[in-house]
Every structure is written in structure tokens, then in C-alpha cells.
Amino acid sequence: MGANAAPLDKLIEQFAKLNGIGRKSAARLAYQVLAMDHANALDFADAIRDAHEKIHRCAVCQNFTEQEVCAICSSAGRDDTTICVVENPRDVTAFEHTREYKGLYHVLHGLISPMEGIGAEQLCIKELLARLNDGVVQEVIMATNPTVEGEATAMYLARLIKPLGVRPTRLA
């Protein structure tokens, strides 16, 4: 029998499942949740539930959205000749904060990583290729991280994209 009450242990376990959260950080977060008044704790739980129930992938770029098509893809002011390919939705947010890039995005939701058992078929690559068939897109910018997995994914995509008459470029 552990030193903590079972619901506390369960809360710690759930926080520890989050990427980058170790057991000590998970315990710290769990104790913070317990320190909240009841109304704030319920608001926190509702926010998690709402996010899971209301947010899904954009039908075009695979970014997270509440609508069928996200605000970026449905904006008439974006440059639809350029697509920036990123690993995850956080990357879209980072690019948008710069206010420099005016093109469209495509979120892969991961990188090719044979060591972790992640192949190209588990990423949103077929959705990207489907976007390149209309002749509008002229350039696809690979904005994956400069890791082994990021480089491998960018090279794989470049080999698929080049024959379609679209210029693959790499973010420096």
C-alpha cells in the first residue's frame, strides 16, 4: 500500500504519461490540482474534456481546429502557392507568432523514426501529396527539426514531391 491515497496516485500516473513530465513533476502538478478550489478543479477538468471533444484535425492541413477547415486554410489572405511542412501543431503556433510567414501549413503529426516504429504511413503524408495535385502549390518548405528523424523525413518528402513539379526546399 502506497503512502498516497489511490486517487492521488492515479492523478500522478496520468500526469507522468505526458511527454517530458517525470514522476517528480507529475507529483508536483497533482498536488497543485489538489490545492485548487473545487470550482477551479472542475474548470480544469472541463477544459481537458472540451479540448478532446471539440478539437480535431483540419481537413486540409491537419492542424488542430474546432471547424472543418482551420482559420489559416480558409483565409483568403494566405499565399496558397507555398506550404510549410511541420512536425506538430505547436510548430504552426511558433511560426505564426513570428508574423513573417504568409503561406499555408501542413502538419505531419510526427517524424519518420524506425527506432520508435514510426513509418511514413503513420504520418499525414498522403494528405500532403493530395494537396499538390492541383498545380497551385509551387514550393513545399520542409521545416522539420534538424535531427536525424527530421532530416530523414524531409529527404523522404523531397523525393516524393519533386516528381510532382513542386520545388521542395529546406528551412535553414
Image (cartoon, rainbow, N blue to C red):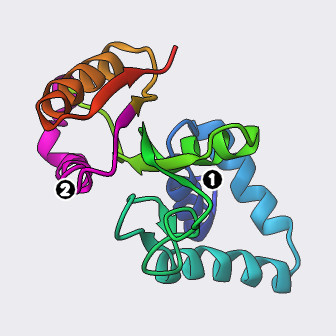
Callout 1: SS: loop
Q: Is residue 140 above or below residue 96?
A: above
Point out residue 75 in the picture as x, y percentages from the top left corner.
Answer: 58, 67
Residue 107 in view, yes or no: yes
Q: Label for residue 130?
A: 2
Instruction: Decide if residue 41 is on the left or right side of residue 63.
Output: right
Query: Is residue 75 inside the magenta stretch?
Result: no
Instruction: Decide if residue 155 is on the left or right side of residue 6.
Output: left
Say what amino acid the circle numbered 1 marks: Ala
How far is the residue under mark 2 from the one under mark 1? 54 Å
Q: Which residues are magenta?
A: 114-140
Q: Tell me what residue is drawn at x 30 percent, y 21 percent.
A: 149
Q: Tell me what residue is drawn at x 46 percent, y 22 percent.
A: 145
Residue 17 in view, yes or no: no
Categorize mark 2 by other alpha carbons within 10 Å: few (<14), some (14-19), many (20+): few
Q: Label for residue 92?
A: none
Residue designated by label 1: 3
